[in-house]
Image (spheres, rainbow, N blue to C red):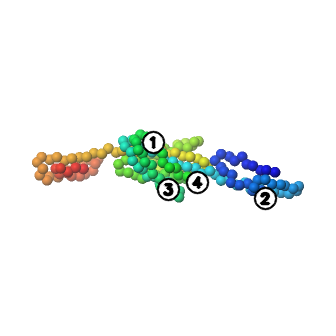
Amino acid sequence: LTLTENTPANWTNTSIVCGTDDGTFSVAVGQTVECTVTNVPDAGSITVKKTTVGGFGTFDYTLSNVGDPNRQVTTSQANNPKAGAPWSVTPGGTYTLDEVDQAAWAEGDFTCKAAGHQDITGDMPAITVGPGENWTCEITNSLRPKITIVKDANPADGTVFPFTGELGAFGLQDGQNK
């Protein structure tokens, strides 16, 4: 006799053991043979896909509950999405994704997608991965504008001119900039 399993998608059959054989066996009249069929879920994955507006750069990410939590994505052209190396994850686990903040960039929210699931959005999305599921989390960052204030006083007598506003409070003398 031969025993085979039509293994469902996203699962792997690791063994069929019947008595002492591996799927091919004999059964005598009145004999009982127990077969053990072992399956494991296929690993899933989570990938970051980065888009930058106004520039390009290298961005760091962390994923909870994995052995190697750190990944980087380097964009080389604005408005051109770039995918990083995926994390291989154990099905059934929940994983939280985070981007390391950079002062020069305004960070958007993640939008994470996988076939057959509702999108998950947020600053630090928690993703529960099923067998064989491949999640892609997209995020767009915009380069913050840079403002330089140059103080020009005539005559330059050492007077400090105070500034306030959304840039904070500071003072500048002739020839200084911020």
Q: Earlier in the sequence, mark 4 or mark 3?
A: 3
Which residue corresponds to mark 3? 69
Left or right of 176 on screen, residue 119: right
1 or 3: tag closer to the N-terminus: 3
Q: Pointer 4: what residue?
A: 90
Q: Few, some or many C-alpha atoms within 10 Å of disc 4 (few <14, some 14-19, many ≥20)?
A: many
Would you call the spot at circle 3 few (<14 residues within 10 Å), some (14-19), or many (20 or more)? Answer: few
Residue found at the very far bottom of the displayed protein: 20
Residue type marked 4: Thr
Q: Please state the horizontal and vertical placement of residue 97, each as a whole percent of the image.
A: 49, 51
Task: Compute the Cα span from label 4 to label 3.
Answer: 13 Å
The residue drawn where x is 36% and y is 41% is: 54
Q: Would you identify the image quadrant in which residue 117 lies?
A: top right
- Please report the residue visible at 53 percent of the width from the left and 58 percent of the height from the top: 67
Quarter occupied by residue 16: bottom right
Instruction: State how far apart marks 4 and 1 are (Cα).
Output: 26 Å
Mark 1 neighbour density, 10 Å: few (under 14) some (14–19) many (20 or more): some
Q: From the image, state whether disc 4 or disc 1 is nearer to you.
A: 1
* Residue denoted by label 2: 19
